[in-house]
Structure formats: structure tokens, C-alpha cells
Image (cartoon, helix red, strand yellow):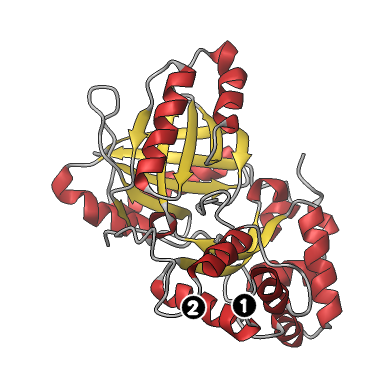
Amino acid sequence: MHCQIQDLDALDRRLIDSYQRGLPVCPRPFLRVAERLDTSEAEVIARLERLQSLGVLSRVGPVFDHARAGASLLAAVAVPKVERDAFAELINAAPGVNHNYAREHDYNLWFVMTAPDAPELEARLGALEARLGVPLLRLPMLESFHIDLSFPIPWAELEST
Amino acid sequence: MTLTPIALDTRPASGNPDAHRHLRALLEQGLPLTPRPWRTLAEQVGMAEEGVMACVRRWQAEGLIKRLGLVVRHRRLGIQANAMVVWDVPDEGVALVGRRLARETAVTLCYRRPRRLPDWPYNLFCMIHGTRRERVLADLAAIVERLGLDDLEHRVLFSTHAYRQCGGRYVREGAA
């Protein structure tokens, strides 16, 4: 269900490659981007709108540091495989869940719970744990060795798959 | 580096804390795609455009904002394989292994987390993304060899389904 990589032309790709970070904080940032990519401000805005509507971009904006922006916690639960979707729905319905993945392990649902502060995080986790009826594996981040989430897009490899 | 939460530090020396909290809540949803996005935001929160930009620059300088730009949904582009690799590293060596893993281009995140014995013996986590499972496993094998990690017990947890993948929402609802 991914979009056709061929639908993204050279300008789309340059936008993505050049501006996963470093969008200028100036009155007309998209004009600056346009000047650097040798196109117009209106074209940049139209491209960003299209990439957003295709779902290629979740948004254009800041990525906040989880550890500093508030409280967050990676948690996992082990649930029966046939009930996994139902458990995942309960997890998604809980306030503050921003990632929720099925993974290949006895602990088969992995999610990140966020909250404005630590007491609220604990309250949210406790409420969800009670709702699920299974113990949460709680794995707070103790130390970060890597704080950059941007990832170079392997365009050529995507073309060939 | 150990990060100290500065969760409630949304109140700079000057300015209106409510407006700043409102601004953060709006920023978490992304910039308006208008020619003057900061002005559009400024109007929504009742600040001056220059004040909004100053706020964002300060949050960048403080590390609250890690990066500002296009937030890509990798799955949507066909980068479907997403492996969480978990390692059981002796405590005295975990920081060194963590720093070396983090320097690998294939590794997009690398965190130390607590063990939860007996169920969970792993204390170091990293993410490796790629177009396909085989590619991710090849990247991992190359890393293990290059860094000499063969002796460390590790597991690869590929994701099989994304029930949710979105940015953080840290600001208290109703704050704005």
C-alpha cells in the first residue's frame, strides 16, 4: 500500500533529501527553499501539499526530543496472536500512544506512550495496563546514543524493488 | 549523553506561557503550508511573528526541537522493513557499544534501556530500516562483523504491522 515511487519526480526527491532537517526559521521559509532548489515558492508549497496528501510526509515541522518534550515510555505486551488486533485497538484508543507496532516475538505488541509529565505518564500506563489485563513490559530510555531520526532515502533501491 | 527531562520548561524568561504551550501544540501538528507559516501560527496563538520565530529558535538551541523539516513516512515510500535489534551487553561495555552502533548509517536510533529479568535480558536497543528484510539482515550482519559483536546475544524483532506511526503529542490536551 505504498505510493508509487515513480510518482515522485526529481524535485520531490530533492525536497525530501535536502529538507528532512534545516528548514530555515525566517519569515518566508518556503521561498528560501525554492531559491535553493531553483524553483518557485508556490511550487514548493504545492509539492509539500501533495506529498502530505499522498501520505509520504506526515507533516512539515519540528521533531521534538521525546526525552525533553515530556515523558514517554516504550512498552510491550505479550498477547494471544488471534487477539492481537483487538489488543492493538485498545492500545491505540488510549490517550498518548504515538507508535504501536506488531513485532515478531512473544512480546508481540510494542508501543510508545507519551504524556505531558511523569505522573500523567504513569497514570496513563496504569489505566491501560488495567484495561488490557496483561502486564506491561516497561522499558524507559536510560541513555540515548543517537538523536537524529532522519534517514537517507535509498531512491535507487526503491526503484528496483 | 543522559538526557534530563525539562518537560515543563515551556516558559521562557519572557512571554506568555499559555501562548507558548499553544504554539507547541500547533507545531506538533506541523506547519501550515502558507507563504508565511510563522505569521499564520502567530495569529492563531496571539503572538508576533518574530516572537514565534524566536521561540522556535530557542527551542532548537535548547535541544527541545531536534530537527525542523519534512517528516517522512518511510513505510509509505516502500521502506517497509523495520527491525528493532535488541542486545544483551555487559553493563560496563554498553555505552561503548551504543556509541559505536549509533555511528553506523543503517542505525537510525540507539538507546540503552533497563533489563527486566527474567523475561527480558536486553539492555541496548537500535533500529535498522531498509527496503526489505534481507537488506536489513545484511546490514546487521555487516555491522556485527565490523564492530566485532558476534559474542553479544541479540535478537531481531521485525515489525509485521504498524497500528500507529505518528509524532508525539506531549502538550496537555485542553492546554490551548
Return the residue at label 1.
B47
Which of B21 and B2 lies nearest the eye of the viewer?
Answer: B21
Q: Position of residue B92 (x, y in %)?
A: 14, 49
Q: Which disc number belongs to residue A52?
A: none
Vertical placement of residue A26 versus A119, above or below: below
Q: Under tag 2, what secondary structure?
A: loop
Residue B66 % position (x, y) = 47, 67
**Residue A112 or residue A1, whichever sits in front:** A112
Using residue A156 as the reference point, say whether residue A134 is left or right of it. Answer: left
Question: Residue A91 appears in which quarter of the rendering?
Answer: top right
Chain to which mark 1 belongs:
B
At a point 56% along the width and 48% down the height, the residue shown is B173
Residue assigned mark 2: B15
Instruction: Characterize the local packing of mark 1: few (<14), some (14-19) or many (20 or more) Cα atoms within 10 angstroms.
Output: some
Q: Quadrant of residue A146?
A: bottom left
Which residue is at 47% across, 45% downward? A114
- Secondary element at tag 1: loop
Quarter-of-image position of residue A130? top left
Seen from the viewer's position, the closer of residues B125 and A92 is A92
